């Protein structure tokens, strides 16, 4: 954030919100800003400087911020990190990532959701079953920071060991 003091420019500063939600201010104590609106930050910074400055005037401008995102990985065509701009479900996220590869285990899509800095919950989603039943009621909405991981199917794990030309001996022509 850029903090501008129009009448006392010596206090102008660019601050970064630290992982603990605090910013380091020039000449005063650190200030917690996590979860606050811009107006609330202005009020908090003004209150922090009222001891040093008489009736401080402060402008706050967001200089740079991390956009909310979700990650899709594993057996999808375009794994990666995607901007979270609108409500997105697991199947929509898979479509955004280009859909399944031929090696994908469609019955075992994992949704990882952080519940604390140390813990994440994992939900197993049977996308193939939802499509077969034509029922998307189990299609969960993503939250910022979620990760969708598509597992490899069992057959894809062994196909690299089976010589494809030799499979012909197992298929008998029907007369």
Image (tube, rainbow, N blue to C red):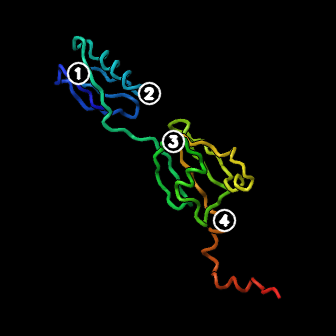
Q: First in sequence: mark 3 or mark 4? A: 3
- Badge nearest the viewer, 3 or 4: 3
Quadrant of the image containing the N terminus: top left
Mark 2 neighbour class, 10 Å CA radius: few under 14, some 14 to 19, many 20 or more: few
Estimate the spatial distance between the alpha carbons at disc 2 and disc 4, rounded to whole Å: 44 Å
Tell me whether circle 1 and circle 3 mark residues in contact (CB < 8 Å).
no
Against 66, is 52 above or below? above
Q: Is residue 105 left or right of residue 172?
A: left
Estimate the spatial distance between the alpha carbons at disc 2 and disc 1, rounded to whole Å: 23 Å
Q: Is residue 65 left or right of residue 134?
A: left
Against 138, is 55 above or below? above
Q: Position of residue 27 (x, y in %)?
A: 23, 21
Q: Position of residue 90 (x, y in %)?
A: 59, 48
Disc 1 designates what residue? 27
Mark 3 neighbour class, 10 Å CA radius: few under 14, some 14 to 19, many 20 or more: few
Mark 4 neighbour class, 10 Å CA radius: few under 14, some 14 to 19, many 20 or more: few
- Badge nearest the viewer, 3 or 2: 3
Q: First in sequence: mark 1 or mark 4? A: 1
Residue 86 is labelled as 3
- Badge nearest the viewer, 1 or 3: 3
Q: Secondary structure at mark 4?
A: helix
Disc 2 designates what residue? 35
Q: First in sequence: mark 1 or mark 3? A: 1
Q: First in sequence: mark 2 or mark 1? A: 1
Tell me whether circle 3 and circle 4 mark residues in contact (CB < 8 Å).
no
Residue 154 is labelled as 4
């Amino acid at each position: 954030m850029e903090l501008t003091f129009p009448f006392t420019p010596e206090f102008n500063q660019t601050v970064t919100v630290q992982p603990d939600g605090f910013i380091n201010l020039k000449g005063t104590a650190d200030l917690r800003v996590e979860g606050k609106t811009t107006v609330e930050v202005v009020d908090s910074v003004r209150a922090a400087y009222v001891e040093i400055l008489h009736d401080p005037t402060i402008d706050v401008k967001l200089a740079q911020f991390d956009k909310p995102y979700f990650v899709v990985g594993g057996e999808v065509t375009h794994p990666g990190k995607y901007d979270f701009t609108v409500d997105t479900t697991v199947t929509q996220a898979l479509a955004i990532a280009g859909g399944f590869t031929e090696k994908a285990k469609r019955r075992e899509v994992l949704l990882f959701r952080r519940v604390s800095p140390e813990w994440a919950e994992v939900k197993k989603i049977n996308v193939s079953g939802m499509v077969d039943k034509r029922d998307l009621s189990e299609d969960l909405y993503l939250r910022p920071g979620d990760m969708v991981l598509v597992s490899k199917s069992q057959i894809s794990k062994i196909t690299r060991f089976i010589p494809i030309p030799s499979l012909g001996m197992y298929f008998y022509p029907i007369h």
